[in-house]
Amino acid sequence: MGKYHEAVQALDQFTKGFCRDRSVKDDLVFRCNECGFELPDKTCLIKAFKCKYEPDFKNFGSMGDL
């Protein structure tokens, strides 16, 4: 495990609790438009951090291994 593993674990929990819009039934909808971690070009800073520092972290957040 890398030195960023704990931070990525915390971000994993955040994404599992925040990113998916659970009010929408029978579809996978994300709340990116409500998130302060999305850049204007639609880059997710949380996912970018995970990919840079813990690229082998499996089943990350609501996004899986997209």
Image (cartoon, grey):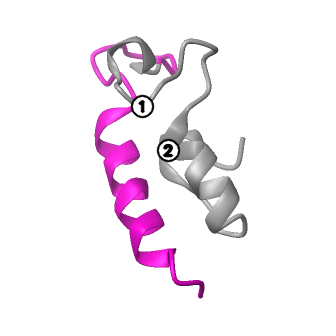
Going by the image, does 53 lie left or right of 20?
right
Q: Between 34 and 62, which is closer to the camera in this rendering? A: 34
Q: Which residues are magenta?
A: 1-29
SS under mark 1: loop
SS under mark 2: helix
Residue extending farthest bottom: 1
In the picture, which quadrant includes the C terminus? top right
Callout 1–callout 2 Cβ contact below 8 Å? yes
For marks 1 and 2 on the same chain, the one whose residue lies earlier in the sequence: 1
Q: Between 6 and 24, which is closer to the camera in this rendering? A: 6
* Amino acid type, label 1: Phe
Q: Which mark is residue 65?
A: none
Crowding at mark 1 (Cα within 10 Å: few <14, some 14-19, many 20+): some
Q: Could you say where residue 19 lies in the image, as x and y percent from the top left? A: 39, 32
Residue at the image point whose x is 41% and y is 11% from the top = 33
Membership of 50 in magenta stretch: no
| Separation of marks 1 and 2 at Cα, in angstroms | 7 Å
Q: Is residue 11 above or below residue 22?
A: below
Residue at the image point whose x is 48% and y is 17% from the top = 29
Crowding at mark 2 (Cα within 10 Å: few <14, some 14-19, many 20+): some
According to the picture, the residue beneath numbered tag 1 turns out to be 37
According to the picture, the residue beneath numbered tag 2 turns out to be 46
* Amino acid type, label 2: Ile
Q: Could you say where residue 2 lies in the image, as x and y percent from the top left? A: 59, 84
Membership of 8 in magenta stretch: yes
Which quadrant holds residue 1? bottom right
